[in-house]
Amino acid sequence: MACIMGVAQTRRRPMDFRFSPEEEAFREEVRRFLDEALTDEVRTRFGLLDTPERQRFGDRLAEKGWLGLGFPTEYGGAGEGLKFAPYILNQELLRAQAPIVGKNVGIIANVILRHGSEELKREFLPRIFRNEIQWAIAYTEPEAGSDLANLQCRAVLEGDEFVVTGIKRFITSAHFADYYWTAVRTDPAAQPKHRGISLLIIDASLPGITVTPMWTIIGERTNEVYFDNVRVPKKYLVGELNQGWYYVMEALNFERFTLTSTVPTEQKFRRLVEWVRTAQVDGRRLADDPGVRRLIARLAVLVEMARMLEIRCICTAVNPENVAAVEAAMNKMWGAVVETELADATLDLMGTSGYLAAGDEEAPLGGQVLDDYLFVGHMRVAAAGVDISKNLIAKRLLGLPGGS
């Protein structure tokens, strides 16, 4: 893709939003793979995080070398190759409703590569790229969500081990993860508070760990994780002591664009447009209503704006020297805003029938509308909420005052 990679050689040259022939050939290879690998039954089982089908699918991606795209071969990666290949792969996985290459690679492997010791790189990166280990990200706590710097989970260094005590809440995948990517407080006296945080890799099989389920409004399992004097070898400290805040923020930047995409938003919008073409209210087609057409046109612009922000973010972040903090925050924030507007507009147009759940024969679009609406709440708070993203944009991009 030639777009936005830098200043064009001539100001008269238009931006080219097309991928290169090699990148499009890779897209076709992914599509052929998905045509063979996916069935409706398998897609249904993908909705559950810890199913054998999902594990086997990840194994097949690993066999293709696609989990290590862009990572050095010395750590089991596939090498540099096509810069946009990881982005293209996730696009096609999302279009096919298959599990994406998620946090194991997009967040954890990236941060280990940039900041982990040589020992950590060699221990974990090859196993991640072979899909041999699963991870849970353990940041949030009862008193530390958006205000993550307020986290209280303590890690005290005793000899060659950290002793970890505390509670983590809303930890997805904790009930089947092999390792916890855990933010802990190592200096309780540090001011500002974020300067006393470190990042640890904690083996989920260690004594003193208890996991209890929590269920979300959309029926997904998340967890509380209790650490009771869990002894973690010092070598599993990621980077430097008390520098974990900066690694966590970097990881959140990766999460804001590697794990969010406009593909599902575009699919929802297209489904809405097709429904509007034929839907009737009081014997009149909705598509004949000028107000409805204006609403649909406005949504089309919002979705396209989200797509452009995503492209800008990817084009910035594809350079390994860049951490696209502002671009990632804008991508995450605007994506959540557009999802909210789209969900609200869809329910407004469908009325009470939009609240019918899957399985009800009168539910429009198979009852997916209600699930989409409920999921918006997650979109608005995951990987830093909309307002947190606005604060970051104001401070980093515009130079406005912000917290320390």
Image (cartoon, grey):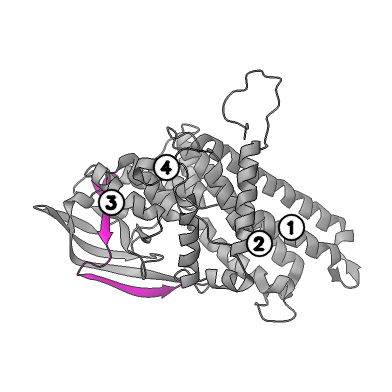
Q: Residue at x 62, y 22 (%)?
A: 8
Direction top: furthest residue: 10
Q: Amino acid at mark 2?
A: Ala
Q: Measure the alpha-carbon separation of dots 1 and 3.
A: 44 Å
Left or right: 227 in relation to 332: left
Indicate which disc residue 71 carries. Answer: 4
Tell whether position 200 is magenta: yes
Residue span colored magenta = 191-217
Indicate which disc residue 343 carries. Answer: 2
Question: Which is closer to the viewer, label 2 or label 4?
Answer: 4
Whether residue 20 is visible here, answered yes or no, is yes
Question: Is the C terminus in the top left, top right, bottom left or bottom right quadrant?
Answer: top left
Q: Earlier in the sequence, mark 3 or mark 4?
A: 4
Q: Amino acid at mark 4?
A: Phe
Q: Measure the alpha-carbon separation of dots 2 and 3.
A: 43 Å
Q: Residue at x 40, y 73 (%)?
A: 214
Asked if labels 4 and 1 touch by Cβ distance under 8 angstroms, the answer is no
Which residue was labeled with disc 1? 270
Q: Residue at x 67, y 74 (%)?
A: 367
Q: Measure the alpha-carbon separation of dots 2 and 4.
A: 37 Å
